[in-house]
Amino acid sequence: MTDDVEDIDERRTSLRIDMEAERIVLSWHDGEGGLNTDEGICIDLARHGVLIDYKQSFELGELLTITFNPDNDKAHTVKGQVCRATQCNPNSFHIAVQLITTNK
């Protein structure tokens, strides 16, 4: 076995950014139309998706608004749709979100 990292076959063609457990703000509408906002943790960010850690699950297809760097002038907001939710322990779910484009 070799230690040369150039030998590793990487299938991903887009840049992937390790967010190193950065705090994010999540917003979503509940079944009654009310707006909910809470904090979560960004685990990973790529061109087409985000992996977050949150204390509860979301329904597949649910729309989320995610704000990175929420407390400073570099805040950036994206929208996405839940495509996978995996329970890690009773108070931790890994939520995969596919980013969607919005017309402004």
Image (cartoon, grey):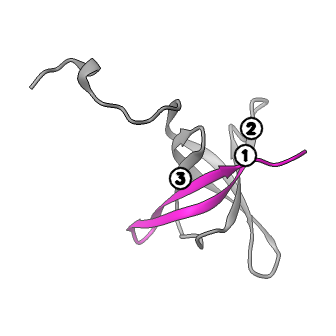
Q: Secondary structure at mark 1?
A: strand
Q: Residue furthest bottom?
A: 32
State if disc 2 and disc 3 touch (CB < 8 Å): no
Local crowd size for mark 2, using a 10 Å CA cut-off: few (<14), some (14–19), many (≥20): few
Q: Secondary structure at mark 3?
A: strand
Pick the residue in front: 98 or 28: 98
Quadrant showing the N terminus: top left
Amino acid type of the residue tagged 3 in the rendering: Ile
Q: Which residue is mark 3?
A: 52
Mark toward the start of the polypeptide (1 vs 3): 3
C-alpha gap between disc 1 and disc 3: 13 Å
Q: Is residue 1 left or right of residue 15?
A: left
State if disc 1 and disc 2 touch (CB < 8 Å): yes
Count of marks, rendered view: 3
Determine whether 23 is above or below 62 in the image.
above
Q: Secondary structure at mark 2?
A: strand
Question: Going 30% across and 30% down the picture, which residue do you hit?
Answer: 9
- Residue 36 image position (x, y, % from top left): 75, 67
Amino acid type of the residue tagged 2 in the rendering: His
Mark 2 or 1: in front is 1
Pick the residue in front: 46 or 19: 46
Question: Going 44% across and 35% down the picture, which residue do you hit?
Answer: 12
Q: Which residue is mark 1?
A: 78
Residue interval drawn in magenta: 79-104
Q: Which residue is mark 2?
A: 76
State if disc 3 and disc 1 touch (CB < 8 Å): no
